[in-house]
Amino acid sequence: MSSLFDMESFDQDKVQLLDDYIGNYVAQNNLEALIPALYKAQTLFGYLPAALQRHIAEKLDLPSSHVNGVVSFYAYFSEVPKGKYAISVCTGTACHVKGASDVLNKAREVAGAHGETMSDDGLFSVNDVRCIGACGLAPVVTINGKVHGKINAKDMEKIIQSTKEAENA
Amino acid sequence: MLESFEALKNWKSAIREQATYRLEILVCAGTSCLSSQADTLLEMFTHEIHEYSLDAEVVLTPTGCFGFCGQGPILKIEPDNVTYVQVGADDVKTIVDEHLNAGRIVEHLLYDPPGQKRSTSEAGMPFYQKQHRVALKKCGVIDPENIEHAIKHSAYEALGTVLHTMDSDDVIDIIKQSGLRGRGGGGFPTGLKWQFTSTTQADEKYVVCNADEGDPGAFMDRSIMEGDPHTILEAMTINGYAVGANQGFIYIRAEYELATQRLFKALSDARKHGLLGQNILGSGFDFDIEIKLGAGAFVCGEETALIHSMEGYRGEPTTKPPFPSDVGFRTLPTNVNNVETYANIPSIILEGQRWFQSIGTKNSKGTKVFALAGDVVNIGLVEVPMGITVREIVEDIGGGVDGDKKLKAVQIGGPSGGVITGDDLDLPIDYDSLQSAGAMMGSGGLIVMDDDTDMVEIAKFYLEFTEDESCGKCTPCRIGTKRIHEILHRLTDMEGTPEDLELLEALCNNVKNTSLCGLGQSAPNPVLSTMHHFKNEYEDYAYRRKKTSYSIDADKCIGCTRCKKVCPVDCISGSVKTVHVIDESACIACGACDDACPVDAIIRP
């Protein structure tokens, strides 16, 4: 985790892109530009570390506490980095009744990624998402955005194991 | 740039007269079908059509959701009116050779309803027979990314009619008389809501489309936006004209990437043709729409929370009054409607309020879209007239419960709703009957549960959700949902007591009566409703007599060894042709033995 004031360690080209985006964003006031700015930042950097939040707060002339309040409120924003393979297990009701919790537990166990933190090897992060709306394919898992349907715990294990093998090969 | 209503009508006629193709292949490109490789099909068809030099005769159209997601990928060939289901990459060449070239129907790709003849068209499928499409009228019919397709199917005609023949009161009267009620869950009369915003005096007003569909297990709004984005833009513009607003916003979940992308495309096309912007169709009315991305919070379905989120705050609700129609976005009068509500507007204008009134029940007019999922044969998106029974939806449209299990309950209304069971399954669905049965219309999630389902676990599932989604502003919801969830946990961990049941009920009623917004007020519903209908299951846990392991019925077991082979923890013993025994202390209740047993000898916990 970078320190609160350390913006140097970030990719400066991306920081420039973010600053340009914030500078050009048309809004009635800075508050309304905050959520769009956070999107842009998360798209560019993958997550929203404290220093980045503080940077955005400065650019928009808002209290950092407000920025962090917003970031921590919404499920979409993440304050920790995601693994190379971001696995999201759908835990909507349709997937739940078809055994999504077994799939989620298996994914966490095999990938070695618990809670919000990624696995030690940096390969995986596992989180649960609310209904991605492919209920016809329940239980559903997305890996880096690609949807995999009708996945049971065994399939999940196989996918993670084969990804590990391919990465370590 | 269309400068008049006449110009729009002329454009429509011109599109209709354009060279027609011999055949049109409509491929469902909704999220569910795309996930089962509809995109590959599209690419392959493009390639094959070109290969056979059929480009001048056959046109390929990616469309919005057909609804029958469980049979995806689905495609339809017009004007032959033939629907093919579960089409794989290997089938593309067959369809091209047989259907496109030889004019023969590919029998094995037709839908094969159990116990009935294969059917060539949607009309022959039980899944579609009781449906009535109003909100989903153009979904699966047009290419959502092609404005000409929308225009061909009368898009923006209702807007033209409104702008040139009606004043704002006329529009509000039609919507009021139609009896349309909000489809987002509350069921508030739409026309009345418009009237409130219309009569508030202000220099500037706004209309907002609530597309923050957060109910787990519901995907109606997303499907509408993916399949027919222009209808939403048209309806919002009509709404703007009726209430006196010149700016609209669509608040949509960022997770809905495809829907967002299609809305952006529709917005830019509509602006290009003068259907949004200054002086729309030469009427002198200006209106434009901006997309605001939401960041995933169930509470933002509540309109005051949604408005705070649009303003850059945490999505926390405030007490009403003041209602958004008085003090809304940027403290100005704001009318918020849900996606599905908007999807009904253009049809009501074009077909008239009497037509709309003729569908549905006394106090609930029109249709409702449900996302049918869970333990049911036909999973998908269905639109039914109000007044149909839950049983008809599950059995006739849904094809009944999956496998040889029995129907136990149907959950309606998601985390704010409850279960329908027994005789209530035969109640005609409308806002009021569902409420009196302890459920609610909600946004349209409809989850079928078979007799394996543990109702206490289901209640726990929903409370885990609401506890997580509670914004934390008011104490009853923040603390109450947490405590309810804890009690449910205690029960399912077999650590509860009979007193917990009384405590649970009292707590649920407190949270219901004292929470600030709809989220908290409805959060206890899944518990109260399951407690009402399945009290015995709660008592089994509270008195700690709930069995948590499987066992084998010695009279039925034939000693086939199948259960022993599939048991993941090897807790089943027995040899061939002798009765098998489960070591109940080691059983993890996974149910694998039950699925494997050919003679139904496994006794479920």
Image (tube, coloured by chain):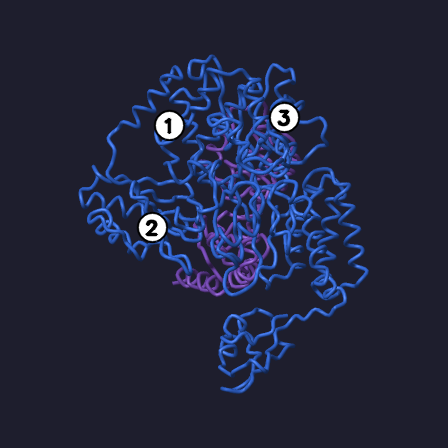
Chain colours: A purple, B blue
SS assignment at label 3: helix
Residue B576, position in %: x, y?
49, 86
Give the CA separation, mark 1 to mark 3. 30 Å
Q: Is residue B350 left or right of residue B465?
A: left
- Disc nearer the start of the sequence (2/3): 2
Residue B577, position in %: x, y?
50, 87
Identity of the residue drawn at 50% across and 36% down:
A40
Point out the residue furthest to the left here. B53
Q: What's the chain of the residue with tag 3?
A: B
The amino acid marked with disc number 3 is Leu
Q: Quick check: marks 1 and 3 in contact, CB under 8 Å?
A: no
Quickly name the residue at label 1: B151
Q: Quick check: marks 2 and 3 in contact, CB under 8 Å?
A: no
Single out the mark in the foreground, 1 or 3: 3
Q: What's the chain of the residue with tag 2?
A: B
SS assignment at label 1: helix
- The answer to whether residue B495 is visible is yes
The amino acid marked with disc number 2 is Thr
Quickly name the residue at label 2: B120
Quickly name the residue at label 3: B192
Q: What's the chain of the residue with tag 1?
A: B
Identity of the residue drawn at 42% across and 16% down:
B281
